[in-house]
Amino acid sequence: MDIHNVGGTPGGTKTFLLGLIMLVVGGYLLFNQVQVNGGYWRFSLFGQGYGTSFGITLIPLLFGIGILFGNGKSLVGRGLTALGFLAILVGIIANLDIHFRQTSLWNTLTMLILIVGGMGLIARSVMPMQQQKAKPAGDPPDE
């Protein structure tokens, strides 16, 4: 393996590293402008519910934990506990509100250009960057 040949093609290491740095910096700046807030916990189908109902998602978790206290090897108890935990986790993620904070057009363009330019440089780095020199017919192949 040759570190100077990114993706098995000649050249491209410096281009790859520059692209990776641009992508990471642009991604950091973009994510730094995003504000995440918790919304109201609603348990509804297609947004047709009213009020909060976090408590109903605790029922399988509490039954599962109760069963596990009675029999620690119970598959039903483990399943209910896992299902309850998953329901709570999905409910938290589903009720997040994500907003892009106000910023200038210059900052937004800088972030997006860093991200897209970094992805372009990474894609370019895995393509051959320079022509390989032709070897004389009598030379053994490289390993």
Image: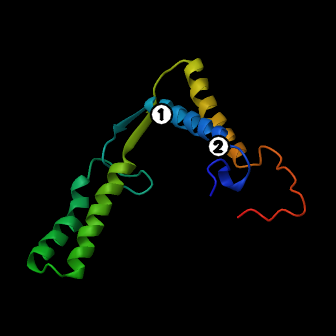
Q: Could you say which is closer to the camera, residue 48 or residue 134? A: 134
Q: Could you say which is closer to the camera, residue 142 or residue 78? A: 142
Query: Looking at the image, can residue 43 be seen?
Result: no
Residue 84 locus on image (x, y percent) = 26, 65
Given the current orientation, which residue lies at the most extreme right position? Answer: 137
| Residue depicted at x 44% and y 30% | 32
Residue 119 locus on image (x, y percent) = 64, 41
Instruction: Tell me the SS state at disc 2.
Output: helix
Residue 125: quadrant of the picture:
top right
Query: Looking at the image, can residue 18 be seen?
Result: yes
Instruction: Decide: few, some or many residues near mark 2? Use Cα within 10 Å; few <14, some 14-19, many ≥20.
Output: some
Instruction: Tell me the SS state at disc 1.
Output: helix
| Residue depicted at x 57% and y 25% | 108
Q: Is residue 58 left or right of residue 87?
A: left
- Which kind of residue does numbered mark 2 sit on? Thr
Q: Give the residue number, with chain letter if any, for mark 2.
A: 13
Is 39 located above or below residue 55 in the figure?
Answer: above
Where does the C terminus fall, quadrant-wise? Answer: bottom right
The disc label shown at residue 28, or none: 1
Q: Is residue 54 left or right of residue 24?
A: left
Q: Could you say which is closer to the camera, residue 13 or residue 39? A: 13
Which comes before the other along the chain, label 1 or label 2? Answer: 2
